[in-house]
Image (tube, grey):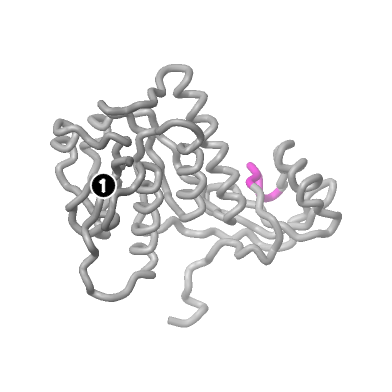
Amino acid sequence: MGPESEPPVGPDGRGGPHVFVSDLDAPVPEADDRHHLERVLRLRRGDPLTVSDGAGRWRPCRWGDELEPVGEVVEVPRPAMPVAVGFVPVKGDRPEWVVQKCTELGVDRLVVLSSERSVVRWEGDRAARHLERLAKVAREAAMQSRRCHLPQIDGVFPLGEVSGEEGIVRAEAGGRRPERGDRLVVVGPEGGWTDVERGLVPTAVGLADHVLRAETAAITATVLYTALRAGRVAGDSPMVNDSDAQGD
């Protein structure tokens, strides 16, 4: 396949920093983004950068009091195999770390779940505040990694609310290998899934050959499925079926 038939791709970082804007024809960065670009990254008039609408479209610009578009708008198609990961929040800032790293790796959707064995409970106003924070973390990570599609952040849902989704699988020891038809892999809390929850999502997939922390399992799932999608994993040797999303 020649270069002329290859699909458009996003910026590779050589065109300067990347920022999300609402209008690619008259790009205006948000105040916090402008401060970061100007005061932290120290952009000067005429320096290159790229802008995106977060829905797959981007274009090169030059920095100044007003951003100057200097190239055509490029539209990057969404992946044919979307990668979605559901996870149960754990203590501290680890949920933000999960969102940051999964966004950098190319996840398309993150679903925040509640579980019978959840240690951390996000409910009501608290849930809304946390989800807002996670969306901000995802946006910042997407800019850092030059993504053109912002990941979708959903939640907080009990497992039963998503158990009917097509292609849903759960991460657990002894499961089968990941497959391209898997559409949402859900990672349990530190204490693991209950028998009732296992019944809600009967298909299990293995992620490693040893026990993973819950947050590590979510990131591992993203690595495996984005690599599978991109064809970066070669060979026919069976994957060692693993451990679960249970903590230590």
In the drawing, does residue 157 fall left or right of residue 174?
right
Q: Residue at x 44, y 31 (%)?
A: 91
Residue 145 in the image, given as x and y percentages of width and height: 57, 55
In the drawing, does residue 176 fall left or right of residue 219?
left
- The three-letter code of the residue at mark 1 reads Asp
Queried whether the magenta region covers residue 201, the answer comes back as: no
Q: Residue at x 66, y 49 (%)?
A: 19
Residue 84 in the image, given as x and y percentages of width and height: 36, 47
- Tell which of 25 and 226 is nearer to you: 226
- Tell which of 97 and 38 is nearer to you: 97
Q: Which residue is mark 1?
A: 244
Image quadrant containing the C terminus: top left
- Tell which of 16 and 21 is nearer to you: 16
Picture layout, residue 145 above or below residue 213: below
Query: What is the tally of numbered marks visible in this picture?
Result: 1
Which SS does the magenta portion mostly show? loop
Q: Residue at x 49, y 28 (%)?
A: 130
Queried whether the magenta region covers residue 21, the answer comes back as: yes
- Tell which of 105 and 91 is nearer to you: 91
Crowd around label 1: few <14 · some 14–19 · many ≥20 (10 Å): many
Residue 226 in the image, given as x and y percentages of width and height: 39, 59
What range of the chain is rendered magenta? 20-25
Is residue 168 among the parts visible in the rendering?
Answer: no
Picture layout, residue 21 above or below residue 70: above
Residue 23, picture quadrant: top right
Q: Residue at x 81, y 51 (%)?
A: 42
Residue 39, picture quadrant: top right
Image quadrant containing the N terminus: bottom left
